Amino acid sequence: MANITKKVSWSSRTDESAAAGEGTPLLNGSEQPRQLSGGGTTFQIGRFDTLDLEEEITTEEQDSARGRPKEIPHNEKLLSLKYESLDYDNIENQLFLEEERRMSFMGFRCLEISRWVVCGLIGFLTGLIACFIDIVVEELAGIKYQVIKENIVKFTETGGLSISLILWAVLNSSFVMLGAIIVAFFEPIAAGSGIPQIKCYLNGVKIPRVVRLKTLVVKVCGVICSVVGGLAVGKEGPMIHSGAVVAAGVSQGRSTSLKRDFKIFEYFRRDTEKRDFVSAGAAAGVSAAFGAPVGGVLFSLEEGASFWNQMLTWRIFFASMISTFTLNFFLSIYHNKTGDLSNPGLINFGRFESESMEYNLYEIPLFIAMGAIGGILGALFNILNYWLTIFRIRYVHRPCLQVMEAMLVAAVTATVSFTMIYFSNDCQPLDQDHTEEYPLQLFCADGEYNSMATAFFNTPERSVRSLFHNQPGTYNPLTLGCFTLTYFFLACWTYGLSVSAGVFIPSLLIGAAWGRLCGILLASIKPDASIWADPGKYALIGAAAQLGGIVRMTLSLTVIMVEATGNVTYGLPIMLVLMTAKIVGDYFQEGLYDIHIKLQSVPFLHWEAPATSHWLTAREVMSSPVTCLNRIEKVGTIVDILSNTSTNHNGFPVVVQVSNNDEPEKLCGLILRSQLIVLLKHKVFVELARSRLTQRKLQLKDFRDAYPRFPPIQSIHVSQDERECMMDLTEFMNPTPYTVPQETSLPRVFKLFRALGLRHLVVVDDENRVVGLVTRKDLARYHLGKHGLEELQLAQT
Amino acid sequence: MANITKKVSWSSRTDESAAAGEGTPLLNGSEQPRQLSGGGTTFQIGRFDTLDLEEEITTEEQDSARGRPKEIPHNEKLLSLKYESLDYDNIENQLFLEEERRMSFMGFRCLEISRWVVCGLIGFLTGLIACFIDIVVEELAGIKYQVIKENIVKFTETGGLSISLILWAVLNSSFVMLGAIIVAFFEPIAAGSGIPQIKCYLNGVKIPRVVRLKTLVVKVCGVICSVVGGLAVGKEGPMIHSGAVVAAGVSQGRSTSLKRDFKIFEYFRRDTEKRDFVSAGAAAGVSAAFGAPVGGVLFSLEEGASFWNQMLTWRIFFASMISTFTLNFFLSIYHNKTGDLSNPGLINFGRFESESMEYNLYEIPLFIAMGAIGGILGALFNILNYWLTIFRIRYVHRPCLQVMEAMLVAAVTATVSFTMIYFSNDCQPLDQDHTEEYPLQLFCADGEYNSMATAFFNTPERSVRSLFHNQPGTYNPLTLGCFTLTYFFLACWTYGLSVSAGVFIPSLLIGAAWGRLCGILLASIKPDASIWADPGKYALIGAAAQLGGIVRMTLSLTVIMVEATGNVTYGLPIMLVLMTAKIVGDYFQEGLYDIHIKLQSVPFLHWEAPATSHWLTAREVMSSPVTCLNRIEKVGTIVDILSNTSTNHNGFPVVVQVSNNDEPEKLCGLILRSQLIVLLKHKVFVELARSRLTQRKLQLKDFRDAYPRFPPIQSIHVSQDERECMMDLTEFMNPTPYTVPQETSLPRVFKLFRALGLRHLVVVDDENRVVGLVTRKDLARYHLGKHGLEELQLAQT
């Protein structure tokens, strides 16, 4: 994912993002870096790793930071501390409870209705965006291919085809340059499909700037440029990210970027509610991309949520429906078939007729074998892409280098395509009812067209469709073989470039090509078996196998494929294929998204604790000692704690002295850095409250207004006098944080943490005294490696 | 649901079930009944309510209990204490942790593989059962209709049709009598579709005998009898229950009923694992019934699970796939099309051709209107059935009465059908390629058949199919109107009878009938619009609306319908219709399954705490005082506590005295009744352990062998000497039970309880002393009524 390739470019950017508050390292990294002596060797956090961090904290160090080494050492056994966690557990402090208690039954009913309205809006806007992307891509690509085609036709006879090649390469490169520039220089997080980022967000990791308006704009423009630029990419993956941004924006009823606050949906301004809407947005994105509303819901659930709530699921479903519906409606207008809603989705696999789709028992082993091939090819793709990404992290981290790489890929893609078409002599007769949009004659006889060109000289979506549906005999095996091989490497090289693009369609295309090849070969082995007459069936199976082998989703992908084909008959084979591809692929390498998440060192929590982790207890896992606050604490202490850049804690247990001083301090609550910042900003000090009796009480609204970009502590001025004041945290802290005893086993802690989406879990002894704090990175640190349980190293990188 | 109607019959049964251990009241009811003074009036648990309970405990009271009143007072604001909870939280005691720590990585891998194997087996067996039911029903119904048809043909001319009627009624009644007898006398829990029971089980409520082998046998035979007996029922619903029973049996690797222990899968002998498999079984059942593997997974998730785990979902999916696959394969052999797997499911909606299935934007409002009609009709159905069920609980509680009612319904169904056919004069020409299996000519001209008979004189599945697919004009509107009306009341009367039967197919049939009627009327209003040419489309929408209005599922039902039609095109309208039906229906009355769950007074936990319950805290909600045990406790004390029938606690916090006697007692663990029973049975006393040094240590295996039918305390003999011994609970208690402080709000407690599937949640003060215990019924007690938050009354009924 581009996130990684941007690691350095972020720090070299202007101060704009640092000033914006979010994403500044002060908010990042929950706990202090610890020296680990886990694997025998001690890992010392080096100068390189903390560069990003310190550069943005202390401006005086910026100059020295500029002189960073060219090569960033990368260690995949690393867990980054720079990512903040999201808090999916409501902070039930007094203010919150008071508000909830004041609210009538009707109030809750209205809230519920507004949730549905927001989901409807999310679906509508996501559908509109998908529609916009589709139409623009369609129009621009149409112009591009028309121009090139005319040029080729012109030069075919006269023999100056190299000029056509140059034209093609230049056109592609310029579009891609445009796309790469906006991504690399303006919003690096918009690179790639965005699916890994959304997975992380739903998992509870705050990826900076991932759901901002600017990201959306760059993403949409970027994806148009890269698809029109002829890269081996799809426009479907980015829809998921777009939907998520739309959801995050709409649900908050304001835009921080545009500095507009519509004063609506204020209740939804917290992580819990926002996450729910982002799930809906991601689902709406999938739904628009593939015309698969149910697939969208399942995608959100499979990739994101852990706690399944019926009402939430229905809302997500609603958003998905509206999204498909909107897209279909507007596309039906665009295609002059107003009101015909039967052809959903950006990618449409076309109509599979039931007659040609029958399959028989003896084909099942074939399907499974194809699933295995998909798994192996997928793993190969992932391994190559992994190496490539490591290379990019090390050497291609300057934005200008990234733009140049993207342009190079675009030019190479055009050149390779052209060469393949040029040297191919697979001529096919041009039927009356041909489906080719831009049939290239080249050196074929009149009334014939170059078959290789249908695969290369086309948007990938159309190529997929023609591989699924063209008549048997439209492609010869050599064409398909060459196409598979070249497209495989092109797609692999392309994924991870600094452009907005998805990997779904290239995967489908590779799979469809070798699947069709399998179909043709099978038919040639046993030409009398009429059941094998249709290679399109095998193209579909191959596409599913390849996609499954690369991304490793099963349930949601099955439904997406079934909904995209519009035919349930093939549900069972697709399932079998995806399951096989996953099992085989997992044997070699993880899924592509997981690889990229790992390479970003994101503290991602999987579904369950590693199986062999029962011997670990909360005592070993937790961070300690913990910085605790008193219920009534001196302002100076709080400011000092918050300003301590070496710790950067985000949550503080609040303790209270029971009766006399000999007694130990008991846990009585938990307060977050963000809450303390708001309290300091509004100067909610005990002494001031007494002197200014008329001062209005701090309300939940004040916290909501500051959400989610709480200012850094440096921006808050506290005078020396004020430092001596006291702050009463009682009203604001969460009085009932979840706690576990020290002896609790890791799987148990993990289950509690994951099921409730916690951010901090307090570890107490049997006297209810705080002994430690478990956060996300304490749990994500342990993972199953080749040799049993492994412990990742923590670093501020 | 039949569960209710059986409430009394259970107590009149022999002692067999009491001796079997499970379902005995000693294990039931987690806490003592409390007198509530919630709503101003105090509810005194009456004599009637405790009848069932005490009868089985004290045999000397049996005679007095026999003289029970004829009328059982029923109060729907009641929460029964007789249901035990399941424990979906692992008991991580020392034994368990030691076992887990001993297990290697390979061990866990093997476990994972055996989970997949078990799921495969579940799918296979469920598919086989579905196949068996289908073939037997098909054959028997074929014979029955053939016999009656011949009889009718014989008497049509000669004028003795009343003899045909009697033959029909007698045949139906005898089949139904057989089905009702085995259900009413042998296994009352097998009545109905079993979906409410499975919902409860997955929710965490232990419904006695619901997953036993005997239940399965009775269910399978019962459903065959009731479908062949011509009742307005389907064979699909019971498949879900059957799948669940298969899963519960297979996953345990033994059958307690058959007294066979295969010594495999011993690791799975606990509630957590068993629940996972039961989810898979239910999904496999849906999958077999409707040919909808994805729908099955969604059903399990929507209706059951709360914690979504990716691996688990895949396993469930696998079981579903195998189930459909098995069913298809064997049915393809039966239908002489070996190897053709394209026609899945027990109910098959037939092939919807894409051409006739197109819809347009202006039809959307029509669909929504039909959804609203479905919602209203569904609510009406539910209200009528609710009254009927109340009536049945009060007056029809003897098994023989129940059998007679079932026979009456069967006879009435036959009579009404016959009368409708007799008086109908809707004659249709018999095409060459007619799809009617048993076309009845009756008084029609030669070459024609009676159209009413296709609806009535047929298995319901075939009737649905003909409503979907028959040519336009096959039915006249009057026929459809009459059919809808009569079938509506028949189906409503039938549901809740003491027979095994589902409500899915009758609902679809009612809906398809009025849907087709709508289609015909629309076409007659605007006959030129070719889009309305196919009333089958409206039949499908009507069927979805009616089913949605009755059962109120949305996501899973959409997928089930889409998978059953085999065509994705209609996904969007079906969704809209189901959503509308749900919203409209919910305005009037709950879903049918929820009604029956409520009438059984099951402590069912919904997805979230009532919205307006933030003012309640754990302190108000919890049960207190709590019976605690010391870590080293006297055997006599334990026996006395367990024998105390007035409390019947199931979980006991274990406390420990810290240092000296002045200090308060700290919580140090939680132990279950079932564990104590096993300890007492094996006489794990401190003194004995010293004297018999060679005695083998109690192992996890001993607990697993006793699971799930732990013996009652009465069956365990403890001598007077042994009463003086001590028991050390350290090794066996769960040392890290989840706790919450007293101030925790109800929604927070609820979330923790529900997300983790807890059974006991200990409430502690800030010194970690036990102050109360929250169990399922404490949370289920609060629900949103018409006038805000209501509190249900607790009773041992």
Image: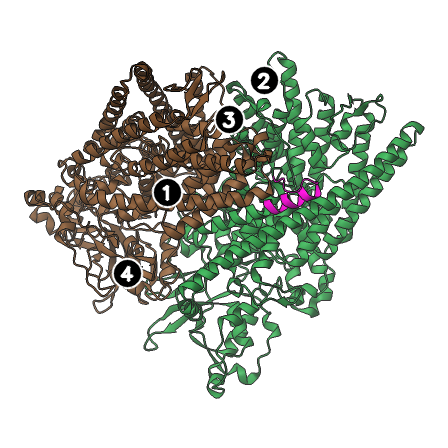
Chain colours: A green, B brown
User: Chain for mark 1?
Assistant: B
Say if the magenta span includes residue B359.
Answer: no
Q: First in sequence: mark 1 or mark 3?
A: 1
Nearer to me, B364 or B201: B364
User: Mark 4 highlights which residue?
Assistant: B622
Picture quarter containing residue A730? Answer: bottom left
What is the C-alpha distance between the residues marked 1 and 4?
A: 33 Å
User: Mark 2 highlights which residue?
Assistant: A531
Q: Amino acid at mark 3?
A: Gln
Mark 1 Cα-neighbour bin, 10 Å: few <14, some 14–19, many ≥20: some
Q: Nearer the viewer, mark 2 or mark 1?
A: 2
Res B293 seen here? yes
Residue B262 position, x and y percent, is: 29, 28
Picture quarter containing residue B235? Answer: top left
* The residue stretch that appears in magenta: A325-341
Say if the magenta span includes residue A337.
Answer: yes
Q: Nearer the viewer, mark 1 or mark 3?
A: 3
Name the residue furthest right: A158
User: Mark 1 highlights which residue?
Assistant: B100
Vertically, is A159 above or below B720?
above
What is the C-alpha distance between the residues marked 3 and 4?
A: 63 Å
User: Mark 3 highlights which residue?
Assistant: B471
Q: First in sequence: mark 3 or mark 4?
A: 3
Is label 2 on the same chain as label 1?
A: no
Mark 3 Cα-neighbour bin, 10 Å: few <14, some 14–19, many ≥20: some
Vertically, is A709 above or below B305?
below
Residue B167 position, x and y percent, is: 25, 20
What is the C-alpha distance between the residues marked 2 and 1?
A: 51 Å
Residue contact between numbered discs 3 and 4, judged by CB atoms under 8 Å: no
Q: Nearer the viewer, mark 3 or mark 4?
A: 3
Residue contact between numbered discs 4 and 2, judged by CB atoms under 8 Å: no
